[in-house]
Image (cartoon, rainbow, N blue to C red):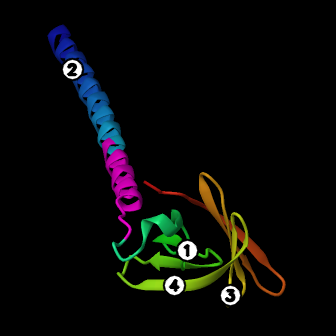
Amino acid sequence: MQTNKLILTIALAGLTLTSCEEEKKDEFSSLLEQIAMYKQQEREIFDFYVPDSIDEALIVATYYDLDTKAHSVIVFADTNKKTAWNFNFLPDSTIQRDKLEQKNYNEFASISGGVQYIVTPKSVNKIVQSSVLSMTQENMRIDK
């Protein structure tokens, strides 16, 4: 009888250890999956190259637009630097563009109205205004 109790106790202890190891493996696997997901998101955000058709000397800022999940570029239209374009390279391979007017050194406004961009060293703030509401979105710059 003592032998059976000892065997049962050893078996239960072994199951508990195995259970703890499996939980640790599950936690570790979950952590690895999260790291892989973050690395994939990082690649999606930072693996962007400005098309050759855009003159790099005229680029004001390259940023990742969180709202549209698009890589975006604000670039002067010409060397006069009075007007600019905001190009959004969307995930479905379409390109949206918006003509901008320079208001100050680091501020641009959409000529069609309703959207302003304020360029800072680390971000591009997009301010969308309607008749009653205003929304500001800070987007991370991804200049190389």
Tell me the residue at 35%/38% (across/down): 27
Q: Which residue corresponds to the image point at 71% horizontal and 64% vertical from the top-left?
A: 105
Rendered image quadrant of residue 30: top left
Q: Which residue is mark 4?
A: 97
The disc label shown at residue 8, or none? 2
Which residue is situated farthest in the right direction here? 132
Q: Earlier in the sequence, mark 3 or mark 4?
A: 4
- Which tag is nearer the camera, tag 4 or tag 2? 4
Which mark is first along the chain, 2 or 4?
2
- x and y, in percent, of residue 56 in the image: 43, 66
**Residue linked to disc 3:** 111
| Distance between the alpha carbons at the discs numbered 2 and 1 | 84 Å
Circle 2 Cα neighbour tier, 10 Å, few/some/many (<14 / 14–19 / ≥20): few
For the residues labelled 1 and 4, the Cα–Cα distance comes to 19 Å
The residue range painted magenta reads 32-50
Residue 131 part of the magenta-drawn span: no
